[in-house]
Amino acid sequence: MARPKIALIGAGQIGGTLAHLVALKELGDVVLFDIADGTPQGKALDIAEAGPSEGFDATIKGTTDYADIAGADVCIVTAGVPRKPGMSRDDLLGINLKVMKSVGEGIAAHAPNAFVICITNPLDAMVWALREFSGLPHNKVCGMAGVLDSARFRHFLSLEFNVSMKDVTAFVLGGHGDTMVPLVRYSTVAGIPLPDLIDMGWTTQEKMDAIVQRTRDGGAEIVGLLGNGSAFYAPATSAIEMAEAYLKDQKRVLPCAAYVDGNYGLDGFYVGVPTVIGAEGVERVVEIKMNKDEQDMFDKSINAVKGLVSACKEIDNSLA
Ligand code: APR
C-alpha cells in the first residue's frame, strides 16, 4: 500500500518542524509547500538527509507549485505570518485572511479529499475562512488549538504537582485567544479532578488561578521570550497528534476548533470543543455540561470569535 501523502502548506518554523516529525514518526511522504522559493526545497533536503541516521523511510519534497500536493491525504496549514512581541493573534487577521484565500483555493483544486488542519492565527477565524474558501466538507476541516492549550495546561499542572505529564489530563474550550476557557473541573491527575486536589491540600485555589492565567497567556509568554516569532515545537507536535488520529482512525478524543452546528446552542460556527477524530475527520462534537461560570466564560469566548469572523466578512465581501 502506498504511503499516505501529507502536504504542509507553509514551510516556516512550524512547517519545518511538522515535516521533521512526520518523517521521524513515518506517518507518510511529505510535500512541503511555500511561496518563498528555496525555503521548502532547502528544508526538505535537510530533513531527508537526516533519514540515514534516523532510519526513516519517507520522501520529503519541497515545492512552490500547488500541483505537487495533488491527492494529499492530509494538509496542515501554517502559511501566513506569526506574531511579534506586543501583537495579539487578532492583529494578524487582515494579512492571514488573504493567505487563507490562496491556500483554500489551492487545496480545493488539488487535494479536495484531504483532512485539513489549520494552525494559522487568529485560529478560529482562519479555520472558518479556510473552510469557506476551500468549500471542503466541514468535518474535513478543523483547527489546531485545544490540543496545544491543553498540553500547556497539563505541563504547568505536572510542574505544580510534581507528577508525570502523562498522568495529567486537562480540558480547554473556546477560542484560541485570551478568552480561552481552561476547565478546571474536567481536568484531573490520574482521574482525580483538580478541585478535589485543592481539597486534598495538593495545591491552592490561588495557584490554580495563576496556572489558568499562565495557560491563557502561554503563546504570548513564548513570543516574549523568543523576540522574533512564535512557538513552533509544541504547536507542530499537537497538529501531528490530530493528523495521526485521522490517518490511523484512532477515534481520539481531542479538543480542536471544529464546526459546531446544533451543539452548544451554536449554529454553524468554528470554536474549540472536544471532538472525536478518526477516519471520517471530525466524527463527533462532544457536548459537555458547563456550570454558570464556565458557560459565561465560554459565551465571552464565542463572542470574541464572532467578532473576528465579522471582521473577516468586512474585509472580504465574498465571505459575507
Ligand atoms: N502561501 C504559502 N505560504 C505562505 C504564504 C502563502 N500565501 N504566505 C506566507 N507563507 C509562508 C511564509 O513564506 C513562511 O515560510 O508561511 C510561512 C510561515 O512561517 P513562519 O513565519 O516561520 O511562521 P510559523 O512560526 O511557522 O507560524 C505560522 O502559525 O501559529 C501560527 O501564529 C502563527 O499564523 C502563524 C502560523
Image (cartoon, rainbow, N blue to C red):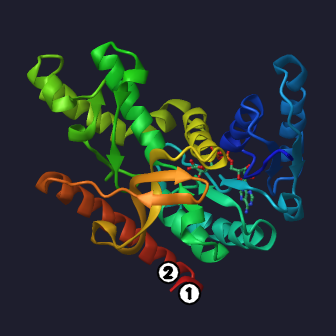
* 200 shown above or below 278: above
Q: Residue at x 74, y 56 (%)?
A: 73
> Is the residue marked by circle 1 packed among few (<14), some (14-19), or many (20+) residues within 10 Å?
few
- Extreme residue in the left direction: 199
Q: State which quadrant residue 301 falls in.
A: bottom left
Q: Is residue 144 visible?
A: yes
Side (left or right) of 73 relative to 233: right
Q: Is residue 90 visible?
A: no
Please state which amino acid type lies under the numbered disc 2.
Lys
Please state which amino acid type lies under the numbered disc 1.
Asn
The residue indicated by pointer 1 is: 317
The residue indicated by pointer 2 is: 313
* 316 shown above or below 263: below
| Image coords of residue 247 (percent x, y) | 67, 47
Label 2: which secondary element: helix
Q: State which quadrant residue 228 falls in.
A: top right
| Frontmost residue, 76 versus 125 | 76
Asked whether disc 2 touches disc 1, contact meaning CB atoms under 8 Å apart, the reply is: yes
Can you tell which mark lies on residue 105? Answer: none
* 299 shown above or below 156: below
* 42 shown above or below 76: above
Label 1: which secondary element: helix
Q: Residue at x 14, y 53 (%)?
A: 291
Task: Specify whether tag 1 is near ligand 1 (CB below 8 Å).
Answer: no
| Image coords of residue 35 (percent x, y) | 81, 58
